Image (tube, rainbow, N blue to C red):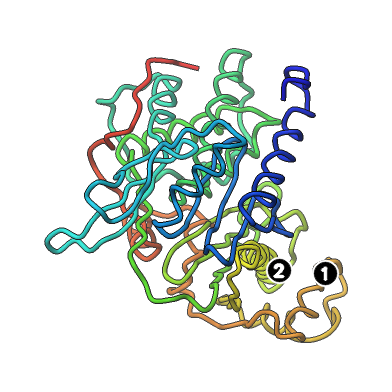
Amino acid sequence: MQKCLYGIRDAGQALEMKVAQVMTAYLNAEQGKFSPCTFYNGQGKERTWVHGDDFVILLPRSRAQPFIDTLGKSMIVKVRGIMGGRPSDTRSIRILNRLVTWHPAAGREVEHISWEADPRHIDILVKQMGLKDTSKPVVSPGSKELQMVLNGPALGASEAETFGSATMRLNFLGPDRPDISFTCKEVARAMACRNRTALESVKRQVRYLLGARRLVWVYKRQPMVTKLTCFTDANWAGCLTTRRSTTCVALFHGDHLVKLSSQTQIPVAISVGESEFYALTKGAAQALGLQSICSDWGLSYAVDIHTDSSSSIGTASRRGAGKLRHIETPLLWIQQIIAKRAVTLRKTPGIKNLADLGTKILGGPQIAQHCRRLGLEIRAGTHPLALRTAATT
């Protein structure tokens, strides 16, 4: 690292190569083929995830200290905590701005792990929008005006700068906050045409976050998992300006939500079935990616994809475009995957589709219901590791 100039790319590359050398040569781990950030030692049952200079390792307790000692011979190691079920173990820790807590069984509460986003970003957003902690919150982050987010009077230079900063901060929170995944995605579409309607939509989302500062992901103990589950849904022509549709994908490891994403479809679908097919293809790609990461850790899972659209299942299960001559043909790769039985398609009722949260504007009760089904909890209070900030930018 001392031979690398400060601020240039070879420093990161040199660190990556050093980490790979230490993990493979001294810790007998195999680097992931799909993701070079993963390492697996089957003999020691050690699974490692590396992000820059941060290491997260899952391993038997008896292997913890030998792992630390071996790593410390080649790198400077700072152990921030060892999480587990013993009273002496670390209970809470901060990992990449996420607050992770191990909850032991107590009374009616079963043992579980929870994590949540650091709420200091909400504090910054509140100040950027000129609000206070005592301002009146709203129960839903979206309103009908969100459908016209690309239209409205242009903002001045100062307000446009504030809008851009707040919008990107919301999108930073989006992956950790499925309850605002759709609304923050929609306002981000107005970055190229910053207008009053979009700014008011941002302010409404911040008012919602005032009343729901903490969205906690809860992982309870579950039986051994044999498959990954993916739910897909689409909102056809939801944008009233461009008539583009929205795709939402929810990925599960057993009962545990791994990821929920909301994205605007690039092709303009001319039917509900077409938009649902695009969502199905996106979900299959993400599920197969998660399957590959798990394979790098020595875990083998089947993949089930759930959708509430019979027409998308029909399109994906046949060969070729058929009568859908206008469909995006590069997306037909999913037909080969299904023919090889690499994934299994399943029809699920619309009211049970867990990807519905990220496709459209929902009311407060609907959001709360979806969060419960996804294993998410809106909690009051403050996490002990949460940071408070006085910054405004």
Q: Which mark is residue 14?
A: none
* Residue found 28% across the figure and 25% down from its top: 133
The quarter holding residue 31 reads bottom right
Q: Nearer the viewer, residue 326 or 33?
A: 33
Give the x, y percent position of residue 60: 43, 60
* Residue hosting label 2: 281
**Dot 1 surroundings within 10 Å: few (below 14), some, or many (20 or more)?**
some
Q: Furthest residue to the top?
A: 158
**Left or right: residue 104 compared with residue 375:** left
> Quick one: label 1 or label 2, which is nearer the N terminus?
2
Name the foreground residue: 164 vs 386: 386
Q: Residue at x 57, y 50 (%)?
A: 49
Q: Is residue 312 left or right of residue 326?
A: left
Q: Amino acid at mark 2?
A: Thr
Q: Quadrant of residue 155?
A: top right
* Residue shown at 59% from the left, 39% from the top: 149
Q: Which mark is residue 327?
A: 1
x, y percent for residue 262: 58, 53
Where is residue 170? Give x, y as percent: 51, 35
Do callouts 1 and 2 mark residues in contact (Cβ within 8 Å)? no
Pick the quarter of the image with the N terminus: top right
- What is the quadrant of residue 318 in the picture? bottom right
Q: Secondary structure at mark 1?
A: loop
In percent of the image, x 55 and y 44: which residue is there? 70
- Residue 286 vs 118, above or below: the answer is below
